[in-house]
Every structure is written in structure tokens, then in C-alpha cells.
Image: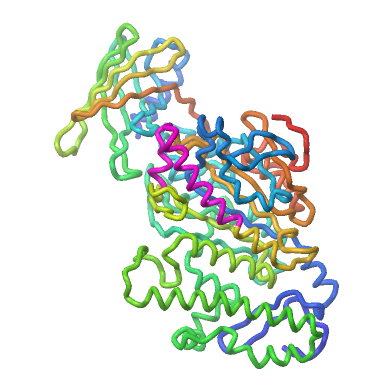
Amino acid sequence: MKVFVALFVSAFALAADPATMTGTWTMTLHAGHDIPTALVLKQQDTKVTGTIRLPTQNIGQLIDVDLAGEFVDRTLTLSGAVEHADPPATVKITGTLKDDGTLEGTLAMHTHGVPWTAERFKERKPSGF
Amino acid sequence: MFLTGTHLPRRTFLRGLGAAIALPYLDAMTPARAAAAARAQRLICIEMVHGAAGSSAFGRQRNLWAPAAAGRDFDLTPTSLRALEPFRDCLTIVSNTDVDPAEPFTATEIGGDHFRSSAVFLTQAHPRQTEGGNVRAGTSLDQLFARRCGAETPIPSMQLCIERVDGGGGCGYGYSCVYADAISWASPTRPLPMIRDPRVAFDRLFGMARGASSAPGRDRLAEDRSILDGVLASAARLARGLGPADRARLSEYFDNVREIERQIQQIEAHNASGELRELPEAPLGVPDAFGAHVKLMCDLQVLAFRADVTRVFAFKLGRDTSNRTYPESGCATPFHNASHHGGREPRILEFAKINAYHVGMVAYLLDRLRRTPGGAGSLLDDTLVLYGSPMGDPNQHNHKRVPFFCAGRAGDAIPGGLHLQAPNETPLANVMLGILHALGLTDVERFGDSGSVFDLQRTENRG
């Protein structure tokens, strides 16, 4: 959780720079229907690390997958091992930063690939809590 | 209680072994209180999950939910609302509103739409993401109204549902199941449980909670007798002191109570027969067929209004991610799967059939209310039925351009016969604030994320 909070803080600090991947993205997997999920990234030079929350076949159940990769020439490349997956699986994400600041690409796992798009997520503070 | 006089208190009950049955309006009741009760506004809030086909881009283009024209000359033919045509004079469709509090506010909330939306519908408040007991949303619209009128009836409000809503702990994405199970919140931290079993609702409404819990009540259930059996003697005494019109009303009312009770007993007998059930986990009183269950719950609500047992119902027709099928709709695809139409036009049209089927259930309710005498005409004149979903396009899991309408005049507070197109990004909370004001709660200045009061009486199209 501490790591997560730290990532949020740096996300806010760097969100103004459109060329950095750092921040929280609402990633939508276009897998027949649209599945929104969170992609949290941190960029240092060209290296990118982060986490994706992958929905499972059990509705409501999620797996957090740690990612590592790079962002070069507006192209994002990430991969991460899905722990406890049977059979063992690796998530591979490729994407491109578009002129409007959104991302689009493909997420591959096992032999399947699904297209995705992403836009920056603006965190809000709920009132009354 | 002595029931020999011709002037009866409004809160007269016929009491007998294991039963205490409220009475409908009678001329013999104390005139002032009876008149006040007769004029009383009533409220039914119905939530359906999974949004609507008409909230998708193609659905908006084809007017699958909201009609093309705003104002009075709207055409319901292409819409999922076409079953409401007989009620268009008291129908108020409000289109193009958003439920922003159901959107994710933090990264961990992204994707959890199915697990928090129902808590938002009647509260318009953003739920706290927790699987523990520290749940928090907002006080719901029905409960704000119940606070005003609840003291005037034996039961301040009642919460009914159709699907199984007894999940414990967390249901997904870090949300407590209570957010998906309850739509009625007595306070921001107190969700109210919902009743799925018509038997439980019946006994609570007409047996005053004595029916199934006391020894005579259990005997009655075991012997398949009527709740009315225990009050026959006092009913006969009461009838002797009434005029012919009141005697007829009383007789019809008892017939209606008995008919609903008989239906429940038949369902229980069938479900206890050992035949394979479609809903094996459901209580004996729950019909397997969705339509039969909804109609029975509607009948109970109408009868409860007639007897002024309560004036407020929250009614949850579905549960998020439910894959129930509705063969009568003409769409064989399970509900959740159908809602994920992939943006493909044929599948959107299929999903619209389910939406239309659900709205048809509301038409049944409105018809029953219209056929039942109320204070100024029919119960429909006194009642406001609101129907909607906190989700817009379920294929995107968004909460924009959500389906919503209300029907009934709530005692001339809402004129009806209107399609109101809201300006873009209008919170549905504005509309709900307008409804609260129409229900007499003009001291409520804000509701959820409302920014202003939506005028439900305007006739010009400002969309």
C-alpha cells in the first residue's frame, strides 16, 4: 500500500508532462465489451515500471501484475509475470502515445491479444468521508 | 379495540389470533385524518441495473430509450418505454443526465462499477471503497421522504427486491456486498436490507409481523389457512356499523388481501412439491418466474398503499452482474452478457428487448395503481413511481446519459406528459432534488452531487 501511495504522489507531481508515462491511467480493454482497469506507471528516463490490475474470469476478482519495460519514441513496451497463473503466463503490453495524450495498443497473454486504449485518470477526493 | 361506532380512527386494525390487519380508507373513518391520508403522496423507487441499450451511441441514434422529441409531442414507438404509452399523460421522461458519483474517484476504484452503482442510485453519493463494516454512501431519496411521512403509517418504508441480495463480506474490487445489495439507505452509514420473499413482505404488511413468528401464525401457515380467518369475527362486527359503500370497500379489500395470500400459498405449495426449481436457493415464497415475482411484489405495494400501511417503497429489480434470462422478453441472452453488447447493432437491439420487458413490469404497476381508488381519484394520482438505472451504457460501464423516468402525479406535484432533455452533464441528482421538492421536501437544498434543482414542470426544451 505504501508503494501505491508513493506512486500516486509522484503521479500528481509529473502529470503535467504529456511525454511521460508516469501517472495513473484508465485502461480500457476492448475484449468484446469494454473492461476498464487501472494502469499505474512510473517513468525514469526511458525505463517504465508499474502495475496493472487484471480482471479474472471470476467477476470482481482481480490480480495485480507488476510491470517493467520502456517508453521510447512514443512507444510503450511492458511485460510482467502473472503470479499463480496456471499455466504460467506473462502479460505483454505494447502501446503508442497519440497526439491527444491518450494511449492505444495491444495486451497479450497466453495466445490471446486484445486491443486497449487508455487515458489519464484524474483522482478525486470524495466528500463526506 | 371497539369497532361498533361509525367513526373509526384512520389507524384502525382488525386484530385476531396471529394477525393485525390495517384497513383501507373508509367513509366512517375520522374525517380529517382520513382526508389527510387520502391526499397523501406516495413513492415507489425502482432500480434496474445494467443501464440501457438506449444509452449507447447507436441506441441514442435510434432512440432506444429516450424519444427523439422533447416536450409533449414525443413518440414512444421506437423506445423501450413504449409499454408506458397508456400512461403518457402522467409520464415524465428525463433524459441526458449523468450519475457521476458512480464513477471511480481513485485508481483502486477503476473497474468496480458493478459493485458500487446500486448504492449510488437513490443516494447520488460516492460510496466508500471498503469490504468492512464501515460502509458509507448517503441517505437515499426514499428515506428522506420516509422521514417526513413515515410516522403517519405503521411501517415507515419497505424495501423489496427480486434477485438474491444476501451476499456477505466483499463482492469485488474492494467493495462490500451491501453496496450491490441495497438501494435504500436510512443514513450514510445504514443501508436497509431488502425483502425478496413475498411471504415475508405480506406478513409484515398485513400480519404486522405476527403472522409467521407467533404460534398462531405458524399454525396458519402449516394448515394453509388465511390471515383473515383470525379477524373474521371483528370484521363482521365492523361491517355491521358501516354504510353500504364502506361495506363494499371492505369486502373488496379483503378479497384482494385473500387473493394475494392465495397466490403466495400456491407458490409455496408448488415450490415445496419437490419439482425441480429454476431458483433452488430462493425461499419457498419466491416464484421462479421473474414476471410473476415482480407482479406479485407490485400487487403487494398497491394493496399496502390502499390500506395506508406504508407510503414508501424501494424496489430493486435486478442485481449487478446477474445473468438471469428473461425468455418473455424475446431475448434469450443472459442479462449481464446481453448488456455487454460490444457496440454491435444487432446485440444492442437485443438488449433493448430486455429493457422494454423490464419497463413493461412498470406498466403493470401503473395499471394497478390507476385501477385502485385513491384520495383524489386513483392511487396513481397520489403516487410517484420513479424508475432508472445508475449505469448508462453497460458495454462501457459508464454512468452517462442514464435511463430515467417517473410516472404518476404525486398529488398534482408533477404534471407529467413530458420528455425533458437535460443539458449535457446534468447530474441526475438535480432531478432527484426536484423530485424531493415536488414531494414537499423543499427544505432540502442539496442532494448528492446536485448543483441546482431540475424543474420537472417546464415545457420548453432546453436540451
The colour scheme is rainbow
Of residues B302 and B207, which is closer to you in this image? B302
The answer, for residue B134, to whether it is visible in the render is no
Image-based side of B79 in relation to A34, left or right: right
> Is B52 within the magenta?
no
The answer, for residue A59, to whether it is visible in the render is yes
Q: Is B194 located above or below residue A76 in the figure?
A: below
- Marks counted in the figure total 0
- Residue B138: x %, y % from top left: 58, 48
The residue at 51%/69% (across/down) is B198
- Residue A52: x %, y % from top left: 32, 29
Which quadrant is the N terminus of chain B positioned in?
bottom right
For the stretch drawn in magenta, the main secondary structure is: helix
- Magenta span covers which residues? B335-363
Q: Is B56 located above or below residue A101 in the figure?
A: below
The residue at 64%/80% (across/down) is B254
Q: Which residue reaches farthest top?
A: A73
Q: Which residue reaches farthest left?
A: A87
Q: Quadrant of residue B16?
A: bottom right
Of residues B369 and B313, which is closer to you in this image? B369
Which quadrant is the C terminus of chain B positioned in?
top right
The residue at 56%/86% (across/down) is B18
Q: Is B249 located above or below residue B153 in the figure?
A: below
The residue at 42%/17% (across/down) is A102
Q: Which residue reaches farthest right?
A: B32
- Residue B365: x %, y % from top left: 61, 60
Image-based side of A97 in relation to B229, left or right: left
- Residue B375: x %, y % from top left: 78, 66
Q: Quadrant of residue B44?
A: bottom right
Image-based side of B170 in relation to B76, left or right: left
